[in-house]
Amino acid sequence: MKYRLICILMCLGIFLSVNAQGNPGNDKEFINELESKTSNIQTITCKFTQTQSLSVLSSNVSKKGVFYYQRPEKILLSFNDGDYIKMTSEDFQMKNGDKINEMKVESNPMLRELKNILSACMTGEIMNSTKDFNHELKKEELKYTIIMTPKKKRVASKIKEIMLEFDRRNMCLNKMRMTQPNGDYTLYEFLDKEFNKQIKQFDKQ
């Protein structure tokens, strides 16, 4: 579970810094549009729904909450049931029920890579991105859709593909689905986004 949640958080950074492996023309247009529409965004606050489809369960499991992002390296997923996932440039913290797990970012290679990705994607250094995924980019009138597939066997043993859907009005993430090799998936949907709103929740957790 911890690995899965960390991978999900990595996707939140990766979605702004996908390495160009698809159509170069479309990739360049996507990156230019992304940079122009997100350069002035300092914070993001929105509702989210997490839906898990697991082969061992007869029905999907859904949880709701609020997502917070603040430049350059602060992320908080606050679930309505009191659980949360919080990350800053130095610390990673996850609450699941009565248990809280904490670790230093610099002591964990995966979290350290996440920090570097987030820094790169939010400061405009888009091409200094992860090279562990290939991708296919589809452009439509109102959205971009990216399908990412891992290159490394270690990652592919955990993740079959990642789907990212962006709203072209503001180039922010609308949906993210991570599918495992056995077909199980976790879907995140981000709704009612507010930009550049003061966030105090990072100090409350």
Image (spheres, rainbow, N blue to C red):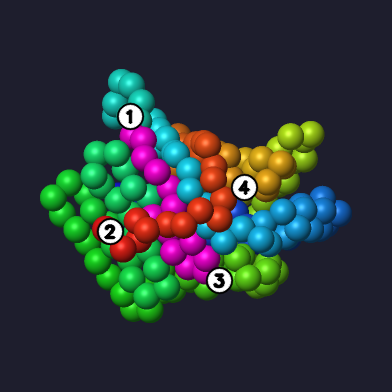
Q: Which residue does the image show at 79% across and 34% down from the upper left?
A: 141
The residue to which callout 1 is attached is 61
Residues at marks 2 and 1, CA–CA distance in whole angstroms: 27 Å
Type of the residue with mark 4: Cys
Assess disc 2: are there few (<14), some (14-19) or many (≥20) residues with their C-alpha within 10 Å of its C-alpha: few
> For residue 27, what is the image quadrant?
bottom right
Q: Is residue 41 magenta?
A: no
Q: Amino acid at mark 1?
A: Val
- Look at mark 2 in the image and give the residue it sits on: 204
* Residue type for callout 2: Lys
The residue at the point 46 percent across, 57 percent down is 198
- Residue lying farthest to the bottom in this orientation: 106
Which circle marks residue 119 in the picture?
A: 3
Q: Give residue 127's position: percent from left, percent from top.
A: 70, 69
Name which of mark 3 and mark 4 comes first in the sequence. Answer: 3
Among the two numbered marks 3 and 2 on one chain, the one whose residue lies closer to the N terminus: 3
Q: Earlier in the sequence, mark 2 or mark 1?
A: 1
Q: Secondary structure at mark 3?
A: helix
Label 4 to label 1: alpha-carbon separation = 25 Å
Label 1 neighbour load within 10 Å: few <14, some 14-19, many 20+: few
* Nearer the observer, 169 or 1: 169
Q: CA distance from mark 4 to mark 2?
A: 26 Å
